[in-house]
Amino acid sequence: MNLSALRVSVWIYLAIFFAYLLGPLVIMSVTAFNSSQFPQATPWECLTFDWFGELFRDERILNGIKNSFIIGAGTVVLSVAMGLAAALMLTQIWPKLRATYYTVVIAPILIPGVVLGISTLVFWDRINRMLGLGPDSFLSNGIFLTVIGQSTFIASYCLLVLVARLQRYDTGQTEAALDLGATHAQAFRKVLLPFMRPAIASAAVLAFLASFENYNTTTFTFGQYPTLTIELAQKVRYGINPSISALAFIIVVLTVFFALLNESIIRRRQLAFAARQNKSVGEVTSGVKLPRFLSGNPAAIVLVIFCIGAVTIVGTATAYSPDACIARVTEEKRLEAEQRIQELREQREEERRQREEERQRNFEGVFDPEELEPGSDAPEEAAPEDDGDSGFGNVFDPGNLQSEEESEAPQEDGNTGFGSVFDPGNLQSEGEEEGAAPSDEEDSSGFGNVFDPGNLQSE
Amino acid sequence: MPRFLKEFFNRNGLGVGLVMLGLVLFWTIGLIILPQLSMLDFSFRHNLPPPAYGGPSDTYTLENYQYLIFGPEGGSQSFNSVDLRVFYRTIIAAMFVTLFNLILCYPIAYYLGQSKGNHIRIFALMLIIPYWINEILRAFALRIIFGESGVINTVLMGIGLFDSPFDFIRNDIALYAGLGYAYILLMIFPIYNVIESLDRNQIEAARDMGASWAKIHRRVVIPYAKPGISSGCTMVFMLSAGALAAPQILGGPSSLWFTQLIYQQFNDNNDWPQGAAYAIVLLVTCILLVLAIMRLFKVNMGDIGK
């Protein structure tokens, strides 16, 4: 295959792949700034920051964040401790047992989270009963169960991270410390722990993130303490709105920020190391003179740009008010709805005229239900008061209440016994145009005509 | 005290040794083994109100497993076709998602593993960032995109491919895309780790000998990357078969995932033994399938998770 063609196809593939990977997150972030009630990027309505305000007013989300942090802290402590102990044990265990032991401690990664949650719940419930404790004891507390359930598999992640570092540890160091008179505890604390510190830090971060985002296990164990993920899942399942996008945007921004920060610090260290080795830093620095922190450090440059962007957004958010735009969109929608109503009305009139002609030809019309229609012109004027609420369509449009069914079933409007014999509308002449129902949706039929303002007049 | 315990404490000291041993035993026995056994035991019990535990009616039974296969006793059908179909569909769909992920990720992992340079770190970062975002939010993002007025429908209708919005959610396309999306990283990293250690000279030698591009992959790269491929596939398969969030958010209203049945048994029907039995069935089936496929491709358990 041609080499350049291959290269181009590789880049196209990479582009598609990363579009699949990052595209959803970008679009979700964008929806946080659209004023539409439903999270959507198209059609774009107005730039708004209101969803962030709504997010921070949401008690349940805030409470969920608090619970997530408590549970996350507990999980970090427990799973890092267990992971470290298990990693040390792995280096010492009887070789014949090692494979079995490794399988047991790695298995939780592969066991479905749902199964872990259920087994934790069932097991501790049984322990609780064996000890004769009540349903509100510590062992059936949601926080305790969630920490235990999550640590079961998060400790395996920690183990993998810690083992990788532990393999490079020279046990001679511990032996030397012991020979020099240190106790075992001292050797552990002063020699082994400092060596393991970077791995422990990454294991802790990993454990916290895994705990924070866990859903499958937590959903069975959380009890009275729903975490942020649980609250989000409930919200997403039962009616979504862009305040979730706002939260997602914040999480995406924080993630990108810390990832870039971490990356630029690593790069900085590498550069410092290279400088110490007397390698020419000049090679990496470009022609443009940059501050020292930024030189030859693309991640740091992106980080700075990113921070400037964030500050700009926050600055705009405080100064910008979307009210004018929202009002305009509402107005546009209102006009659109009005136009639709107008079209329908004309259509209706046309039909009526045709029927009228037919009727006159057939000498009918005196007891035609059409005449029983109690409507008047008043609600018709109120009809175009569409508030532009796209989520509800026109269900609450006052105009809808005067539905098409009206003419066919006048009994429904509360005048049952009398039909509409006493309807003042009857007295009106045939030629007069009565309330042509401006409804354009079938939904309205569900209400019957119970709320028809015209009904009140007809009494 | 047995000899190995004495040795152990000599090596680590009594205090450190005890803490270590305690933690490891607590984790392996108290958190991993006993809860699973307890769930297994529980799945053979009747669904009783708490006061009846340990009473005369607290006996072992197979009824929870019978329910999955034959449905409720005295039911009109001879098989519990609803639940069985959900189970079957879950397993097949999880396999399909795994295969899709493998095909999608292998070229990326190969590319990342074989090229050198700074941009690889950036790519790695771009891979990891989505994985740090909450699972629920990732599913939510896909739901926005695949929704009726979502970006994809807007684009497709803009091109003129469809006249009316295509319901991706009802057709489960959103679900499969979401499951694949959720576990991309777990597929890429094991394969990447293995391919990174593959000596480039091997590929060049094969090329010099006149092997075609496809043949190099079939005869050199894939056999070498087998441990990585199998551990990636195992993880993706187990996690997507056991996924709960994505099916709840992205699944169509008429199609269920087996984990959702388990969830219903626990939370809606309040029938814990039944839920435990379903969970056991899921776990055992998945493990057997993975072991069978590993046997088929001649991979060892020890390679997983490396």
Image (cartoon, rainbow, N blue to C red):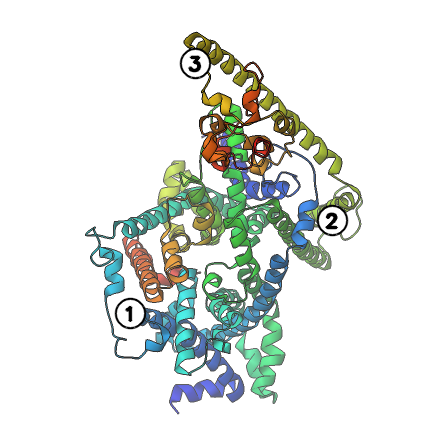
Q: CA distance from mark 3 to mark 2?
A: 78 Å
Q: Which residue is more in the foreground, A181 or B82?
A: B82
Given the image, on which type of amino acid does mark 1 rest?
His
How far across and down, in percent of the image, does residue A195 sit? 60, 72
User: To which residue does mark 2 refer?
Assistant: A307
Q: Which residue is more in the foreground, B161 or A196?
A: B161
Q: CA distance from mark 1 to mark 3?
A: 72 Å
Q: Which residue is more in the foreground, A107 or B169?
A: B169
User: To which residue does mark 1 refer?
Assistant: B46
How far across and down, in percent of the image, does residue A69 sit? 61, 65
Q: CA distance from mark 1 to mark 2?
A: 59 Å
Q: Which residue is more in the foreground, A147 or A328?
A: A328
Count every numbered label the image shows and give the total. Answer: 3
Give the image quarter of residue A192.
Answer: bottom right
Q: Is residue B4 above or below residue A371?
A: below
User: To which residue does mark 3 refer?
Assistant: A364
3 or 2: mark nearer the eye: 3
